[in-house]
Image: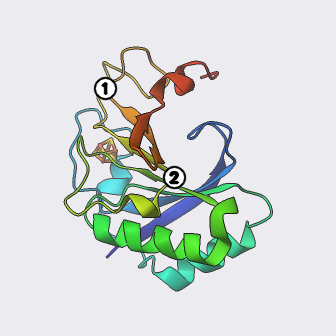
Amino acid sequence: MLRYAGHDVVFQEFPDEVTLAVNLAGCPHRCPGCHSPWLRRDEGDELDEARLLALAESYRDAVTCVALMGGDADPQAVARLLTAVRERFGPRMHTGWYSGSDALPPGFRPEAFTYVKLGAWRAELGPLTSPATNQRLYRVTPRGLEDITPLMRRRPV
Ligand code: SF4
């Protein structure tokens, strides 16, 4: 189960996208220097398909991408919800996932995603915009995952 922890419209998490970013609580990771410790608490209402689609519907003309930020406690639910977004809005609405894991989960379903970010938070290496970052942003293509992290480094911080 995924738990809703708020949402924002953001402009820099994915290249050339205006994104409805839905934050998820219950993060199972314990990165030293965590930038969002409140997201580690297992609290908040369930983010089910109906709630996510209603939220996305209210932003459908304002965003080009719907993303789930977190959700590593239930990656199957992440894929299920983003598949529902794809089915509702079609190819014009891209989908993204910010995972704090270093690897894809077992049974990863690439067809649910336009973008996937992988990598734990390591403060000394910095975020995706940092040249030293350990994190990676991938675009899902028919040929597999394309590492587009360098596109983030050209963007203003
Ligand atoms: S993945 Fe993010 S929210 Fe989770 S522990 Fe690491 S920095 Fe904190």
How many residues crowd mark 1 within 10 Å: few (<14), some (14–19), many (20+)? some
Rendered position, 108 above or below 136: below
Q: Which residue is mark 2?
A: 114
In the structure shown, which secondary structural element does the residue marked by tag 2 occupy?
loop
Q: Nearer the viewer, mark 1 or mark 2?
A: 2
Against 122, is 86 above or below?
Answer: below
On whether ligand 1 comes within 8 Å of the CB at mark 1, the answer is no
- Identity of the residue drawn at 37% across and 53% down: 38
Which quadrant of the figure has residue 20?
bottom right
Q: Quadrant of residue 122?
A: top left
- Camera sees residue 42: no
Q: Residue at x 78, y 58 (%)?
A: 62
Judging depth in this view, the residue of 157 and 76 nearest the camera is 76
User: Which residue is tagged 1?
Assistant: 134
Looking at the rendering, in which quadrant would you find the N terminus? Answer: bottom left
Q: CA distance from mark 1 to mark 2?
A: 21 Å
Q: Is residue 30 left or right of residue 132?
A: left
Give the position of the C terminus as an image quadrant: top right
The colouring scheme, among rainbow, by chain, secondary structure or one colour, is rainbow
Rendered residue at 49%/81% (across/down): 49
Q: Residue at x 40, y 74 (%)?
A: 80
Q: Amino acid at mark 1?
A: Asn
Query: In this picture, is 129 found above or below 88?
Result: above
